[in-house]
Image (cartoon, helix red, strand yellow):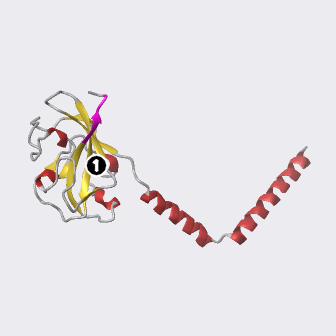
Amino acid sequence: MLTLLSRLSSAFDGVAEAGLRRSAQRFGRRSLIAALGGALVGGAVLPMLPFDRSGGRARAATGEDDDDQSCEYWRYCALDGFLCTCCGGSVSSCPPGAEPSVVTWVGTCMSAKDGKAYLISYNDCCGKTSCGRCLCNYNMNERPGYRMGVHNDINWCMANNRGMYHCTVAAVIGVSGAG
């Protein structure tokens, strides 16, 4: 029995060695490194799903509901950046000359008017220099920077061709089931 196992082991070793030698003759180390590099770069280019940075339902500091040029506007409960409403855009569209970021983050904000929780998509508007007006910085439930999806100090424009940050919009994308 032991000799049979020894012969099978030797046969397996011989087949494995022959396969590895053929592979080494066909493919060099550079092609392996090129394939790994392509996989890494390709993975970074793929579109990313939205991130939930609110950490659950949140409400802006004062609950004021009507002034979309105020940081206390209910949609801005997880926003960090300049308001596009102060920079020539609207609450849900970028100003002329700027384009929305390919990557977005989401938050769940409560509207004081109807008491419902809404999913808000936050998009940085990219391609122009920073607006510099109406800076809002809500850090409710923010996590440390090593957890990118829950850290709101990231330049999300880095996924676009024109990576300069201009301002941020807050579009309602649905009613939350948590409300």
Position of residue 76 measured from the top left corner of the image (x, y, whole percent): 18, 43
Q: Is residue 63 left or right of residue 128?
A: left
**Label 1 residue SS:** loop
Amino acid type, callout 1: His
Give the magenta range.
172-177
Q: Quadrant of the C terminus?
A: top left
Q: Quadrant of residue 57?
A: top left
The residue drawn where x is 89% and y is 46% is 2
In this orientation, which residue lies closer to the viewer: 139 or 178? 178
Position of residue 165 measured from the top left corner of the image (x, y, whole percent): 23, 60
Q: Is residue 13 left or right of residue 31?
A: right
Regarding residue 147, the answer to whether it shows in the image is no
In this orientation, which residue lies closer to the viewer: 68 or 82? 68
The residue drawn where x is 10% and y is 47% is 69
| Tag count | 1
Q: Is residue 85 above or below residue 178?
A: below
